[in-house]
């Protein structure tokens, strides 16, 4: 297969995220939350592999007709933001004014963040919370904390979007990348497990989600606090 066709294949792989988002939305409309999250996990996996493939096959050079970055942002808004916000609102985890406030700040804050040209740091991390609401809402479904805790988490993470707090990209942030990739893979495994058992209480997947989520959320901030080791000069 030529490099051009490989580049086109990567674009088409990215585009499958739109179909997966529709599958997730159809499940959400019917209140099948576990199935919805399973589709979102598949979409997350696709999003995790299409970026490295795009760089490997240089899609900007070999198939510049399609804007892979724009396509990725469209799909990400559907799978990372819109559908999880809908699920949080319609599931009953937040009721009344708290639900309305949550979907407004999630949708509004995230679209502004996605358009921010400063969202990436020099080390390919994210400046501010990268609007990964698909991951956050899944953990909230699994743990089912009180409405007050959910609202604090939602508003707090939205505020951090517009700060200089760093959040790692498990694939692109070089520092601690081996550990970050392992944590990301474990998170996907625990998320799949939790959704598969319909978020049953007492599942060990819940603790796995909590531990891996805390790492993914705090690793970037820890990197800002902990200086890199001084390399020995030969």
Image (spheres, rainbow, N blue to C red):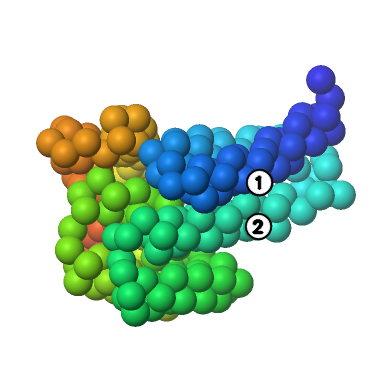
Which residue occupies the extreme top position in the image? 1
- Label 1: which residue? 18
Question: Quick check: marks 1 and 2 in contact, CB under 8 Å?
Answer: yes
> Could you tell me residue 173's position as x and y percent?
42, 50
Relative side of 36 to 221, left or right: right
Q: Is residue 158 visible?
A: no
Q: 217 or 15, which is in the foreground?
A: 15
Seen in the picture, residue 104 relative to 229 is either above or below; the reply is below
Residue 131, label in figure: none
Q: Quadrant location of residue 126?
A: bottom left
Give the CA separation, mark 1 to mark 2: 8 Å
Up-down relation of residue 46 to residue 112 (above or below): above
Residue situated in front as seen by the camera: 171 or 36 = 36
Which residue shows up at 27% across the image and 71% down it? Answer: 151
For mark 2, what is the residue? Answer: 74
Question: How far from the left and from the top, in percent, is residue 70?
Answer: 70, 58
């Amino acid at each position: 297969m030529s490099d051009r066709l490989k580049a086109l294949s990567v674009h088409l792989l990215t585009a499958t995220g739109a179909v997966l988002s529709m599958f997730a939305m159809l499940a959400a409309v019917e209140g099948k939350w576990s199935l919805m999250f399973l589709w979102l996990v598949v979409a997350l996996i696709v999003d995790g592999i299409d970026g490295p493939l795009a760089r490997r096959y240089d899609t900007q050079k070999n198939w510049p007709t399609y804007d892979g970055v724009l396509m990725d942002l469209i799909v990400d808004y559907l799978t990372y933001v819109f559908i999880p916000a809908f699920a949080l609102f319609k599931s009953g985890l937040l009721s009344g004014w708290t639900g309305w406030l949550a979907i407004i700040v999630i949708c509004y804050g995230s679209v502004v963040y996605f358009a921010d040209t400063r969202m990436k740091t020099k080390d390919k991390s994210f400046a501010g919370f990268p609007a990964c609401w698909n991951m956050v809402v899944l953990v909230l479904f699994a743990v089912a904390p009180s409405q007050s805790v959910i609202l604090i988490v939602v508003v707090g993470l939205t505020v951090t979007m517009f700060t200089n707090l760093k959040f790692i990209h498990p694939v692109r942030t070089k520092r601690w990348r081996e550990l970050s990739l392992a944590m990301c893979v474990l998170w996907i495994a625990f998320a799949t497990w939790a959704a598969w058992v319909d978020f049953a209480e007492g599942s060990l997947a819940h603790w796995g989600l909590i531990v891996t989520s805390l790492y993914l959320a705090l690793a970037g901030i820890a990197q800002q606090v902990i200086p890199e080791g001084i390399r020995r000069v030969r």
